[in-house]
Amino acid sequence: MPVETTNGPKTEVASVRVSPLLHIPDILRELGHDPDPIVRKANLSLADFEERETEISYVVASRLLAVCLAETGCQHFGLLLAEQGGSSSLGIAGFMIRFAPNVRTALAALTRNIELHDQGGSLALAVGDKYTMWEYAVHQPDAQAVDQIYDLSVGIECKIMRELCGPNWKPTEVLLSRSPPEDTTAHKQFFRAPVRFRSAHNAIVFPTSYLAQGVDSKDPILFQHFEHETDTQRAHRPTNTIAKLRRYLQASLLDDTLTIGHIAHQLGMHERTLHRRLKEKGTSFRKQLEFVRYMAAQQMLADVTNQVSEIAVALRYSDATAFCRAFKRWSGCTPLQWRNDHLPADTGPENG
């Protein structure tokens, strides 16, 4: 169903498999809470957690995490979920990587097929000479508890690497856009690595040499079978060029690959074809880029420690004035007005 932002564009409400959230009732009980009324506050029921293939709205899933955070006060609730997660939480996209020949192939396959599990976010694998960054990005507007979503998603990335490389594996660094919780012990214990909060990315960083490591359970025949199956499933999903474009734009927003040529290549089409298809839908590459910037800006503004000038730089605007002008065109108000209207009063407005 369409979601309308004030003076802004529309998008589709994405879905996500409930599997990574299956342990929420158990975690709530361990924290001393009755899960039934908490789950109902998010317009779900305990029956929704009985089948891992159940798909729910990404917005509803995020609302559930927000309610859990509010009711328990546990600022690392997403990490508690990640402890119970791993490749098996991600359906066929995660299951198939166990049979990949090496880590590079496994991560590339999961990054390519994550849409079969999650349509509200995307993965991106940036391979460098010395270090590789595996990133998750939320692109669903109106998602709540984004800090917990990122803790959960980056935590599952780390769990997957430990499945592939051994239980003692640890990243070089962990990047999280969220503000640090009052107590960072849980993050340090989970990742066993330095955690950089208030980052422009949500990712694990590790030596590129790990990509060449073989997978102990590799099986070429089974992997080829699952490649065919995932290709078939993706081919039979309703074609939504705009949704896919937004996923790639979100993943490329903060790096050097944000060109229409690169994005068209990612979508498997020529630039002219992408321009034509967008025109047929009454939009353009520039409009979609602005929309993704708007979504990213809202997420960054939700953290009161982010200065408007810093957000402008991160979103590749020439200066804060240009960013503020664009944001007012999207939302009808300035970034600071939006922050004051959308955040709890006790967070306080930004100075200056």
Image: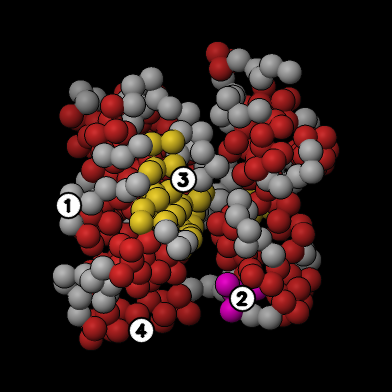
Dominant secondary structure of the magenta stretch?
A: helix
Q: Is 67 placed above or below 152 here?
A: above
- Report which residue position mark 2 lands on: 265
| Sequence order check, earlier mark of 2 and 4 | 4
Callout 4 amino acid: His
Stretch in magenta: 264-268
- Left or right: residue 287 compared with residue 267: right
Write the residue at 73% across / 70% down.
278
- Report which residue position mark 1 lands on: 167
Circle nearer the viewer, 2 or 4: 2
Task: Quote the CA–CA distance across marks 2 and 1.
Answer: 36 Å
Position of residue 311 measured from the top left corner of the image (x, y, whole percent):
66, 37
Q: Is 110 placed above or below 322 here?
A: below
Position of residue 97 measured from the top left corner of the image (x, y, whole percent):
28, 69
Callout 2 amino acid: His
Can residue 128 be spotted in the picture?
A: yes
Callout 3 amino acid: Asn
Position of residue 191 measured from the top left corner of the image (x, y, whole percent):
29, 41
- Left or right: residue 284 compared with residue 340: right
Helix, strand or loop under label 4: helix
Q: How crowded is mark 2: few (under 14 residues within 10 Å), some or many (20 or more)?
A: few
Q: Residue 181 carries which label?
A: none
- Report which residue position mark 4 lands on: 228
Position of residue 157 measured from the top left corner of the image (x, y, whole percent):
34, 53
Instruction: Between residue 294 and residue 53, name the one nearer to us.
Output: 294
